[in-house]
Image (cartoon, rainbow, N blue to C red):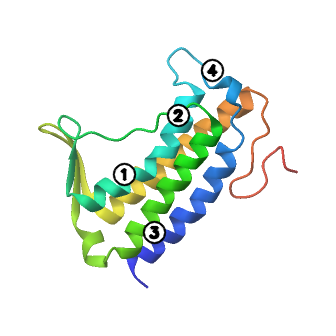
Amino acid sequence: MGINTGLISELTYEASNTRKMLERIPEDQFDWKPHDKSTSLGRLACHIAELPRWINYMMANTEFDFTKDIFDRVRVSSKDEIMAAFDTIIQQAVALLAKATDEELNIKWTLRRGEMKRFELPRKAAIRNMVMNHIIHHRAQLSVYLRLLNVPVPGMYGPSADEK
């Protein structure tokens, strides 16, 4: 089994969990924040939806520099648009991974801001960290937002307190 097969399996499994969480966001609360320092519910949902797009950048280049490269952010205003963007981005990521060889996934990929190198990892590790772990992290934040808004939280790896 190639590295890409494992990454695709994990990405599609986590995407199905992420989709369950995104489906619960209340559109009338897109501007809501749990704290002044927090991001809004709508921006958080868009960020979660856009994260798999990093796979496009990782597979097309060996580095991303925030001082000169532009990340194409998801900017939408409805739950349906977020869901559509997420589904499209996941499909694109899976298609790219399906074509990726072990050799390509072992190539080092660097994230930097000018001279400051944030990290350098093999693409396979960068995908796991910057895409999958990052999605799981923000999905957990989203679950707290939903809880605070009294929206039933779906279970991710078993039933939630709302799904006994």
Q: Are marks 1 and 2 in contact (CB under 8 Å)?
A: no
Reading the image, the residue beneath label 3 is: 7
- Image point 35% across, 61% down: which residue? 125
**Labelled disc at residue 32:** 4
Q: Position of residue 19 (x, y in %)?
A: 64, 51
Query: Circles 3 and 4: CB distance less than 8 Å?
Result: no
- Check residue 76 in the rendering and tell me which mark sits there, or answer none: 2
Q: How many marks?
A: 4
Q: Residues within 10 Å of mark 2 (few under 14, many from 20)?
A: some
Residue placed most toward the observer, 109 or 42: 42
The span from disc 1 to disc 3 (Cα, nearest Å) is 14 Å
Q: Nearer the viewer, residue 95 or 48?
A: 95
Q: CA distance from mark 3 to mark 4?
A: 34 Å
The x, y position of residue 132, in whole percent, is 47, 55
**Of marks 2 and 3, the one in the foreground:** 2
Q: Amino acid at mark 1?
A: Trp
How far apart in space, not on screen, are marks 4 and 2 (Cα)?
15 Å
Instruction: Write down the residue under mark 1.
Output: 54
* Residue 140 found in image quarter: top right
Marks 3 and 4, the one that precedes in the sequence: 3
**Considering only order in the chain, which callout, 4 or 1, is on the residue closer to the N terminus?**
4
